[in-house]
Image (cartoon, coloured by chain):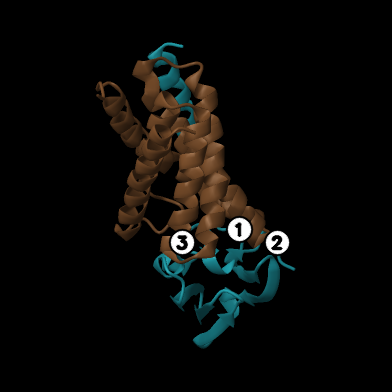
Amino acid sequence: MTARRLTRDALLTAVALILFTVEAQIPVPVPIPGVKLGLANIVNVWAVCTLGAWDALCILLCRIALGAFFAGNLMVLFYSLAGGLLSLCALLLLRRVTTPRQVWVCAVFAAIAHNAGQIAAAVWITRSLAVLAYFPFLTISGIIAGFFTGLCAQYLLSRRLS
Amino acid sequence: MKTRVWLWVLAVILGISLLSILWARRTPSMIAGIYVDGECLRRVDLNRVKAEERFTVETDDGSNTILIQPGRICVEAADCPDQICVMEGWLPEFGFPLVCLPHGLLIQLEEDAP
């Protein structure tokens, strides 16, 4: 890993971490666990599209570990990890079948996958299928949030970075 | 694939989600089960509650104060960081199971009477 690559990944991790931490301060209007904007998804999508799977994974794992540390809650680590890894898989798969103008589609499915991962973690923790009742609600919120973060990422990708 | 195809796929997912929300919001019974990490602490028949009752559930990760009134139940207070379980309000009005994910607490209406 070159110094250039390391610096770039570290900067992106910092950006993702800031988005993640700031977003945690925004009160969520609906009392459904797991509903959120997922702003850090922007960094995720951008990293997958420009840097590739390996760098995106490093950024994701560092952001999740540090994010849980800043949130001061070990459970956050568990939920983020389940959601984050699944959404990264979705991004990597969809990346192959979409065009640069359909980046938002990747982000939407990444958001849905993130919610699916979180629900799976919740099922495992509560040892009950009752939390599955939230999934359709989370899917709808994921589509909306993913569309927004996806458009942000697409807009960023369309700019040439020097 | 064309963007229009993707839009259709998303529309179908959206439709299925909306339908399953409507389906899930029915109230199966008035018997509430209180669970911590999958273990049932107690069951309450909300129709038979006469007086208001308040009790605290202590878990390894924190505590939740549960309030039971005739015909309904809620999490009144919790020391979890997100307070989502408190915001969820009353069951059965809320329509979904009440959960406090940081503490592994779950309150749901039972499918059939025990």
Instruction: Specify the label residue B28 is tagged with.
Output: 1
- Asked if badges 2 and 1 are on one and the same chain, I answer yes
* Residue A69, numbered circle: 3
Q: Residues within 10 Å of mark 3 (few under 14, many from 20)?
A: few
- The crowding category of the residue bearing disc 1, from other C-alpha atoms within 10 Å (few below 14, some 14 to 19, many at least 20), is some
Q: CA distance from mark 2 to mark 3?
A: 42 Å
Q: Which chain is cyan?
A: B
Please, which chain is the residue tagged with disc 2 on? B
Determine whether the residue tagged by mark 1 lies in a helix, strand or loop. Answer: loop
**A19 or B27: which is nearer to us?**
A19
Q: Quadrant of residue A127?
A: bottom right
**Residue drawn at (31%, 24%), measured in percent from left and top?**
A157
Q: Residue furthest right?
A: B114
Q: Give the answer, above or below, for where A8 lies relative to A138.
A: above
Which label is found at residue A148? none
Identified by mark 3, the residue type is Phe
Q: Which circle marks residue B112 in the picture?
A: 2
Q: Residues at marks 2 and 3, common chain? A: no
Closest to the observer, B52 or A120: A120
A2 shown above or below B52: above
> Of the residues tagged 2 and 3, which is closer to the observer?
3
Q: Is residue A3 above or below residue A71?
A: above
Say what secondary structure mark 3 lies in.
helix
Could you confirm whether marks 1 and 3 are on the same chain? no
Q: Position of residue A136 (x, y in %)?
A: 50, 43
Q: Colour of chain A?
A: brown
